Structure formats: structure tokens, C-alpha cells
Image (cartoon, helix red, strand yellow):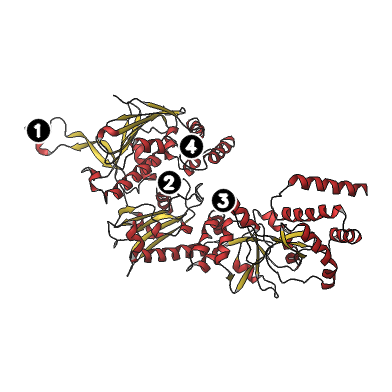
């Protein structure tokens, strides 16, 4: 029974994105070709890698190439490759949907850009939907593909006009790989004609010259007719044609391995185009590192630091950005063995001539050469970051600082070096990043520890009651808002001989409360503890507070309130630990409560005030009240009494 054509609707977000692409005008539409060529190059990379284990999938077709075929009469442009190809399910996954997190957020960004007249192909490219950028120039796209190793009758045909639906059906295809045919829109007066061979040559030279595989196009040329084939008269003068027109396959890209060239010979423009091809990024890189190491460990490396973080930076299945080559032969993509997780934002190429061509990932993990390259590469990248100008480093850190700090926890050998690269906002510098070196240099003469506090945002932290006495003594406090900071400080216990100390935990060794005054409050504190027995393990006079009435603190090794919040958000149940309720004996509220307590210990209002003090402390640290309705009622009653008085 003959299989029928299926028609599917794009997901809502995808349909809206397509609508924006199809109906928007761009000044740089031609970049669609780079995206399709990059996809074709990736497909060849994949089949080449898979063929190391399954050589039969090449089907005696190991001459990898990407072919461009313009047709001015039919107004089509076809891009084909003999790469890995796709199955029906892979087409549905890779083409039928945009299987990326954050689609809704990206769509909102696109809409805002469109309303501000700032919609550009760069925004499309940042999200990694390069295939769909072809709808900028095409009124219909037809894709035919056969997965490597699949029978010819298991090919798949996909087509769409970008109207919100796509069709997919089985077909036949002799060669493995993918063919994409764009049915082009009519070119405007000042728009390039993408069926013009010179236009295609220019675009490929500009954007895809460094693709490792030949990008070819059939070109009609005029060549001389061999002398012995030319018809001549009696005097030897040619009669008729001396040239004939032939069609020849021409390679359009230079295929230069840019990483093997002397770095002084490679221009900024060449680097930018190579990076865009390699990283599928539409923005130029922030900076780069071009290495050639000779000696015991020999390799070339060309790595780039992106200017912007991708939307899926913190997704667990995100790929690393290093490609591994051996003597310019592609070995593998996503080479985790060459770069640690905390540098996963780095994009680039490593070419190691002494590497075994048939190396597997398992062998890579034990390979001494790879380990040496990794250690050297990490050192060079960290040095590059350390030497970056301050303004450029701030730009980098705003995008990738949270990722880099993961290395403080995971890389024991580079921990101190990464800590020196870390930047924080502080109570002295809430608008500008500062280093730990700067903080240590500014420490007060009597200050023995580096103080910090963790939480959701700078504003709430800088106004935290835990910092009141520290501010009074002009002690600078690190304001840590990245979740990774909590983990990093479990490994980084000190810096330059100065231990880290949480402003929320333990004894801060500040001014001690007046012992005589403490004696006067002991009975009241005992009463409050009795009322809050289920919530707090101790009620005591605070050495932290100056203006606020109450705060919650923990023991030195207790979990912080922010860590508890992070674990709950991740669906984990943190261990239940009672906190310490600290009260400011000098605060007017405590003076009033003490007087009421001494006058009538059985006054029903005292229980209400105990709960209010606890709730105020929870709110002050950004916590969630157990019973917000009760708190609102109690505050209302207190306000009524105050107004009546």
C-alpha cells in the first residue's frame, strides 16, 4: 500500500517565528546561504565521524562535497550534500519543530525588535534556526533526504511555504545526504539575484570560504578548441569557431585551514567569517586565541570567545564548541575531552597531527597527548581572559561569568586562577564589577575575613539587615547573586590568606552586645523562644543589627537561606534546620515589647508580637511567609492601635 503524504502544523511559537521571517524585510538576506552551507558541512562532519566505525555507510562515495545549483529559468536555488542525511523522525525533530528551550522568550525578543524596527537576521541566527532563514528569500522550500545506510526507498521529502504547515512523505533517493531546493521569491529592483552565478560566488567567498569541504557549482566556460581539431583554410587560417562552451564543476571556496596559517597573515575579517561558520553565530567574536605549539606536544589551536551567551548556555544537553582535527582531517565535534565544562562557551578548532585518526571518545579520556593539550589550552585561555582590557572583560563577564565560576568548584588545579578572574558587586561597588584582589586591598586594618552574602538580587542584598553593623564599620561585603556562588564557596574557603565569612551565619566577631542589657532581656528572649519553639532554635541579642528590629541567622555550617531556596526551586527537599532569631535590643519596638512583657506576661498581644518579629525577619531576607494572611491581619491590627493612640 502506497504511503500517503502527511501534513503537519508547526508549533505555535514556530509558526509565529516563521511569520516574522517570511513577512519581514532584511538588509542582509544573503546570509541564508551561509546557514544552509554550514548545515551541509555539519552533515558531512557527522557522516565522516560515523564512517570511522561503520565504513560501509559511505556506500563507496567518500568524495565529500556541497553542490550549489542555480536555475534562472525555474527561479530555484538548490543546495545538496552527501552528508549523514536524515530519517523521517529526524526530519520531524530537526525541521518540523524548533526543539530548543526558550522558544517563547526568543519570540518575545523578536517581536520587540520588530516593533522597534531592529529585526535583523542576526537575531534569527542567535537562536539557531538558520534553516528557517531561507524563507527570507524563498516562497517555498523542498527538502529531500536519505539517511546514510538507509535503503533508497526510505528517503523523505519535506516541503513548506512557511504558511504554518509542512508536508512530509516517503520518496526515493539514490545517494545519501540532503537536497534543499529553494523556490525563490521574485527579486526586487535593488535586490541580488540568487540564481546569478557571480552573486553566489561573492557570497561564498565572503561567508563560507573556510568550509572544509569543496563547495562546487557547474559553470559554463569558453575554452580553446585544440589546434588539431580546428578547421583551417589552405593558408592555415582558422575557419569557423576556435573556442567551444563546456560545463565544468568549479570549486568556489579556498578550503584553507585558517588555523594552520601564521596568525599575522590572517585578517580580522577572515577570523570573523570563519568564526561565524564554525559557531553558527551571527555576531563577531569578542576575542580570539591563535596557537601553534611545537615540541613534545604539537598542535594548532584557534579558539574564540563569543560576544553573547546563547540562550541554551545552562541546558544540560548543550554541546561544547571545540572541533578536533588530525592533519586537517575532521575527527569529531563537541570534543568535551579538550575543554572543561566551565569553558564550554569557547568555540574553536584543535588540530593535533600526532593523534590516531580512529580515536574514540573513550580513548581520548586516557590519551596523554589530549590531556597535555587540554591542560595547555585551559592555561592559555585563562591567561587570555586575565590579560583582557577591563571594559572588554566586563562585557565578557556579564555574559559568561557565572559559567566560568563553576571552575572554582570543579577544577582544583586552576581554582585560585579562576577565583582571581571572578568579579562581584559589593557594598562599595553595587554598579561595577570588582575583583577579589581589589576587595582584599581595601580591607580595614582590623578586618580578618572577606564578608559575603548570597541572594536573588543586588538591591535586596545591599539593603539586608545582616549588613547593618558591617556597613557601620566600613567593612566591604561581596554581594553574590549567581547560584553557582554557593557551590564555589564550598571549595574556595579563603583567598590570599583571608577566609570567607557569610554575613548571615555564625559570630561575626563585631561589637559584643552589652552584657547587663542582655541580662535584662533574658526573660523576654526565653518567652519568645517558647512561642516560636517549632521555628527557631535560639533567640539572642544581635551584634549584626543597627536599624532593623530582627533577622534570622544560622550556624557557620548551616545551609544559607538562599541555598535552601535554590534546592526547593530545583524540586529537592532541603534538610530542616532551625534558625537563630536575632533581635536588636536598642530598637524602640523591643523596648516597648519588653515593657509590656514585664507589666503583664499573660497579655495576649505578646504572642502576636512574637510571630510578627519572626515574620519580619523572614521578609527581610527575602523568604516566603508561612501564613501571609495572618501577617497582614496582625499588621493591620498594630496599625489600628498605633493610629488610635
Dot 3 or dot 4, earlier in sequence:
4
Dot 4 or dot 2, earlier in sequence:
4
* Neighbours of disc 2 within 10 Å: few (<14), some (14-19), many (20+): some
Residue located at (15% from left, 36% from top): 225
* Distance from the alpha carbon under mark 3 to that under mark 2: 31 Å
Q: Nearer the viewer, mark 4 or mark 2?
A: 2
Q: Nearer the viewer, mark 1 or mark 2?
A: 2
* Distance from the alpha carbon under mark 1 to that under mark 4: 54 Å
Number of the label disc, if any, that sits on residue 280: 2
Residue located at (44% from left, 60% from top): 340
> Does 320 appear above or below 143?
below
* Neighbours of disc 4 within 10 Å: few (<14), some (14-19), many (20+): few
* Neighbours of disc 3 within 10 Å: few (<14), some (14-19), many (20+): few
Q: Where does label 3 land, which residue?
A: 570
- Tell me the SS state at disc 1: loop
Q: Nearer the viewer, mark 1 or mark 4?
A: 4
**Foreground: 68 or 523?**
523
Dot 1 or dot 2, earlier in sequence:
1
* Distance from the alpha carbon under mark 3 to that under mark 4: 43 Å
Can residue 268 be seen here? yes
Amino acid at each position: 500500500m502506497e504511503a500517503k503524504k502527511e501534513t503537519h502544523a508547526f508549533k505555535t511559537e514556530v509558526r509565529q517565528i516563521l511569520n516574522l521571517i517570511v513577512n519581514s524585510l532584511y538588509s542582509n538576506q544573503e546570509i541564508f546561504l551561509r546557514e544552509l552551507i554550514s548545515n551541509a558541512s555539519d552533515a558531512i562532519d557527522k557522516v565522516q565521524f560515523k564512517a570511522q566505525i561503520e565504513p560501509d555507510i559511505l556506500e563507496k562515495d567518500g568524495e565529500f562535497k556541497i553542490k550549489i545549483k542555480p536555475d534562472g529559468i525555474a527561479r530555484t536555488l538548490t543546495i545538496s550534500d552527501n552528508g549523514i542525511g536524515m530519517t523521517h523522525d529526524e526530519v520531524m525533530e530537526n525541521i518540523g519543530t524548533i526543539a530548543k528551550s526558550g522558544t517563547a522568550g526568543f519570540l518575545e525578543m523578536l517581536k520587540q525588535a520588530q516593533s522597534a524596527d531592529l529585526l535583523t537576521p542576526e537575531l534569527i541566527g542567535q537562536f539557531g534556526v538558520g534553516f528557517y532563514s531561507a524563507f527570507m528569500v524563498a516562497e517555498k522550500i523542498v527538502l529531500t533526504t536519505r539517511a546514510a545506510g538507509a535503503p533508497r526507498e526510505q528517503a523523505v521529502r519535506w516541503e513548506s511555504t512557511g504558511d504554518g504547515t509542512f508536508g512530509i512523505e516517503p520518496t526515493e533517493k539514490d545517494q545519501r545526504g540532503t537536497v534543499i531546493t529553494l523556490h525563490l521569491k521574485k527579486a526586487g529592483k535593488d535586490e541580488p539575484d540568487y540564481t546569478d552565478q557571480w552573486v553566489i560566488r561573492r557570497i561564498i567567498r565572503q561567508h563560507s570560504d573556510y568550509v572544509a569541504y569543496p563547495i562546487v557549482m557547474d559553470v559554463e566556460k569558453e575554452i580553446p578548441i585544440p589546434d588539431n581539431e580546428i578547421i583551417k583554410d589552405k593558408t592555415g587560417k582558422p575557419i569557423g569557431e576556435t573556442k567551444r562552451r563546456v560545463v565544468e564543476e568549479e570549486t568556489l571556496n579556498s578550503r584553507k585551514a585558517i588555523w594552520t596559517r601564521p596568525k599575522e597573515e590572517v585578517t580580522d575579517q577572515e577570523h570573523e567569517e570563519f568564526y561565524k561558520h564554525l559557531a553558527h553565530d551571527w555576531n563577531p567574536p569578542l576575542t580570539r586565541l591563535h596557537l601553534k605549539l611545537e615540541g613534545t606536544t604539537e598542535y594548532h589551536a584557534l579558539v574564540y570567545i563569543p560576544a553573547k551567551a546563547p540562550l541554551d548556555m545552562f541546558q544540560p544537553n548543550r554541546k561544547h564548541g571545540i572541533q578536533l582535527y588530525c592533519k586537517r582531517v575532521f575527527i569529531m565535534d563537541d570534543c568535551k575531552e579538550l575543554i572543561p565544562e566551565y569553558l564550554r562557551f569557547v568555540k574553536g578548532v584543535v588540530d593535533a597531527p600526532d593523534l590516531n585518526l580512529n580515536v574514540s571518545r573513550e580513548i581520548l579520556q586516557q590519551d596523554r597527548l589530549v590531556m597535555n593539550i587540554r591542560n595547555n589550552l585551559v592555561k592559555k585561555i585563562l591567561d587570555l581572559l586575565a590579560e583582557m582590557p577591563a571594559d572588554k572583560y566586563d562585557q565578557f563577564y556579564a555574559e559568561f561569568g557565572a559559567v566560568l565560576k563553576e571552575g572554582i568548584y570543579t577544577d582544583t588545579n586552576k581554582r585560585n586562577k579562576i577565583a582571581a578572574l571572578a568579579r562581584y558587586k559589593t557594598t562599595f561597588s553595587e554598579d561595577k564589577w570588582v575583583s577579589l584582589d581589589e576587595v582584599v586591598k581595601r580591607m580595614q586594618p582590623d578586618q580578618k575575613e572577606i564578608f559575603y552574602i548570597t541572594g536573588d538580587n543586588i538591591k535586596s542584598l545591599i539593603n539586608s539587615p545582616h549588613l547593618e553593623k558591617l556597613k557601620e564599620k566600613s567593612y566591604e561585603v561581596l554581594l553574590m547573586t549567581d547560584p553557582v556562588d554557593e557551590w564555589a564557596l564550598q571549595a574556595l574557603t579563603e583567598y590570599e590568606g583571608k577566609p570567607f565569612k557569610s554575613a548571615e551565619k555564625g559570630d561575626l566577631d563585631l561589637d559584643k552586645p552589652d552584657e547587663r542589657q542582655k541580662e535584662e532581656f533574658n526573660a523576654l528572649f526565653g518567652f519568645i523562644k517558647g512561642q516560636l519553639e517549632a521555628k527557631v532554635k535560639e533567640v539572642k541579642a544581635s551584634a549584626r543589627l543597627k536599624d532593623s528590629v530582627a533577622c534570622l541567622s544560622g550556624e557557620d555550617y548551616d545551609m544559607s537561606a538562599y541555598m535552601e531556596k535554590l534546592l526547593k526551586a530545583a524540586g529537592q527537599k532541603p534538610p530542616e534546620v532551625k534558625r537563630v532569631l536575632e533581635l536588636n535590643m536598642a530598637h524602640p519596638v523591643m523596648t516597648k515589647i519588653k515593657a509590656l512583657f514585664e507589666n503583664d506576661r499573660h497579655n495576649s498581644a505578646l504572642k502576636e508580637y512574637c510571630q510578627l518579629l519572626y515574620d519580619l525577619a523572614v521578609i527581610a531576607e527575602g523568604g516566603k511567609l508561612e501564613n501571609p494572611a495572618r501577617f497582614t491581619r496582625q499588621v493591620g491590627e498594630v496599625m489600628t492601635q498605633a493610629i488610635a493612640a
